[in-house]
Amino acid sequence: MSPATHAVVGAAIAGATPRIWLAIPLAFASHFVCDAIYHFEAFYPLSRALGTTYNGAFAAAAVVMAVLLLPVLWLLNRGGRGLGALYVYSAGTCAVLVFDDWRVRAALTFLIAGLFLLAGREVRLARWIIGALAAQLPDLIREGIGPLNRFHIFMHYDGSRDLGQIFYSLVQGEPGLHTNVRFENPYYLTGYAGEVLIEVVIVVGLLYYLRRPPRLSK
């Protein structure tokens, strides 16, 4: 899933777990659970359609989704409960995907998290950022840790059978189209829209959960 989705899931875990030392490994583990769920991953076909790189398509899709969710964020954040800062953090960590080097992406993400932790005035927001970073961590370091990368691939849903491919095959009764033209087909687009909707439901639902008054004091 996108860094923003992982961040919101991690923040929700940190907000619901009484001890932050327990929330961190739970948020880390949540990354693999989330990636096992169908979500939009057709970034290579999207990069062909946009004429950009894989990472550029990833970043563009994540930022567009973040912008489209701004009205929802405004409604949820009307009580001034710090969701705006979490949202900005999530969008910022999506923007670093334009860099191809995983070490640069990791360093910038840690830098963004550190800035939010230093500038934040609420303990609750600090917990959210720590949980968000823990949930994003596997993607930040897995390219440098072979066993972790292999486990990530094992847990990730089969990208060759995404919802676009499945929907096209069910309707047309054919194996599929070449990746370069999938964004020109309405059946693929319908499947991809379903994958995006899954992430949107997760993000909006957890933002609504985080909007509730804090119950934890530690």
Image (spheres, grey):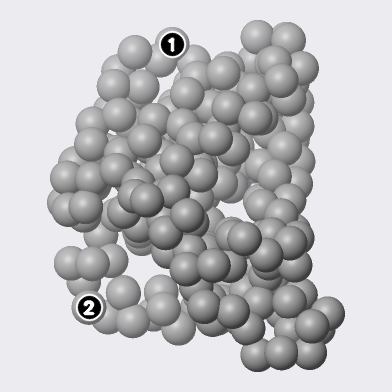
Q: Is residue 30 visible?
A: no
Foreground pick, 176 / 199: 176
Location of residue 47 in the rendering, given as x and y in whole percent from the top left corner: 41, 55
Residue type of the residue flagged with mark 2: Gly
Residue at image position (54%, 35%) is: 64
Dot 2: what SS? helix
Side (left or right) of 154 relative to 119: right
Q: Considering only vertical position in the picture, is 175 above or below 123?
A: below
Foreground pick, 42 / 85: 42
Toward the right, the furthest residue is 171
Q: Considering only vertical position in the picture, is 217 above or below 150?
A: above
Residue type of the residue flagged with mark 1: Arg
Mark 2–mark 1 CB contact (< 8 Å): no
Location of residue 218 in the rendering, given as x and y in whole percent from the top left corner: 53, 31
Number of other residues with Cα within 10 Å of mark 2, as a class: few under 14, some 14 to 19, many 20 or more = few
Task: Tell me which numbered mark, 2 or 1, is placed earlier along the sequence.
Answer: 1
Q: What residue sits right under mark 2 in the picture?
A: 146
Q: What residue sits right under mark 1 in the picture?
A: 121
Side (left or right) of 142 relative to 31: left
